Image (tube, grey):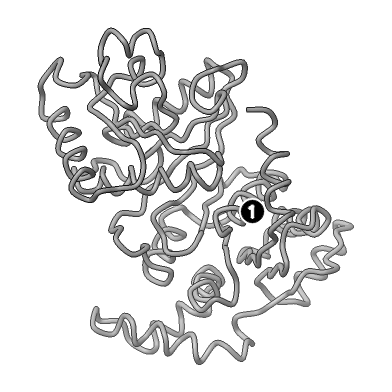
Amino acid sequence: MGDFKKEMLGIVKNSPKRLVLPEGEDIRVLKAAEMIIKERFTSELFVLGDPDQLKAKAASEGVSLKGVELLSPLHSKMLPDYTSKLYESRKNKGLTEEEAEKMMKDTVYFGAMMLHTAEVDSMVSGSMTPTAKTVRAALIVVKPREGIKTVSGSFVMIVPDCSYGRNGGFIYADSGVVPEPAPEQLADIAISSAETCRKLLRTKPIVALLSFSTLGSADSPSVLKVREAVSILKQRKVDFLFDGEMQFDAAVEPSVALAKAPNSIVAGKANVMVFPDLNCGNIGYKITQRLAKAEAYGPLLQGLSKPVNDLSRGATPEDIMIVSAITVAQAG
């Protein structure tokens, strides 16, 4: 499908949004902020941390922060209001006002509250923060989107010289968050992945719920779980094409689809792959990445009311910039 990075940057430059990067203490984030300003895909860019320290760190590395809004949660006029909002939303779960204030002084939670209160449209965290903390801040403050109870992780896979999917473009899920999804969670993952496909691959989602069985060719508890998820999707009357349970080859190769699932509306055409569990999803994306020399972007968080994405702790400034562009696209 061509150059995914270039395509993403083209999309977000035409519809810039507000973004917060909470980990300003990381020089890679400051370098990424400079790149984001140069690429001009944000209408406002906030980097959190002590402004004087961030300016000094940037200057020592020759990084320009012109056009970047530097904000310290500790000295923000929004801190009392944010603390109150978090306390009110969590007091019935035992959170105290002191605990709420401590959380809001943390840049990741503060950034999440900026997103929740519509001060920004998107957030990217994780270069210095464990995935579990980024996900927890998103769940507690940003919250899942209406009708979805499961936050999951997807990868955009771009396979070179490939005619399957969207000219080699796929969404793989869940490849990063939910270890053993129940049928209801698999249905949530399918719905969220379809939306990710629309936002990032810019095409109609065609969703295959994967298994080692194709439409009744075998039985096992894992197969029955996938079948139940398909039934749940039918009950929900979702607005995208889906089918399963289905083997990977039947999902993507028309000749196999004709032999194994001739009446399927999805077989041979799928561009969204929903794996039955995290083992399969994680192994599957890494096999595709290494053997097919595919580009893998993720894990991208999905199922939230507003876009938050995680970073690898080994992310480069360019990685942070590209994930930021993807997150802004999800806000579009």
Residue sitting at 19 percent across and 21 percent down? 215
Residue sitting at 74 percent across and 74 percent down? 69
**Left or right: 323, with 307 as reference point:** right
Q: Out of 15 and 133, give the one closest to the viewer.
A: 15
Give the structural element (helix, strand or loop) at label 1: helix
**Left or right: 5, with 74 as reference point:** right
Residue 56 in the image: state x and y as whole percent.
82, 69
Residue sitting at 41 percent across and 19 percent down? 252
**Left or right: 169, with 151 as reference point:** right
Residue 262 in the image: state x and y as whole percent.
27, 14
Residue sitting at 69 percent across and 40 percent down? 7
Q: Out of 242 and 228, give the one closest to the viewer.
A: 242
123 relative to 319, above or below: below
Q: Residues within 10 Å of mark 1 (few under 14, many from 20)?
A: many
Q: Which quadrant would the C terminus be assigned to in this image?
A: bottom right
Which residue is label 1 attached to? 324
Q: Amino acid under label 1?
A: Ser
**Left or right: 101, with 201 as reference point:** left
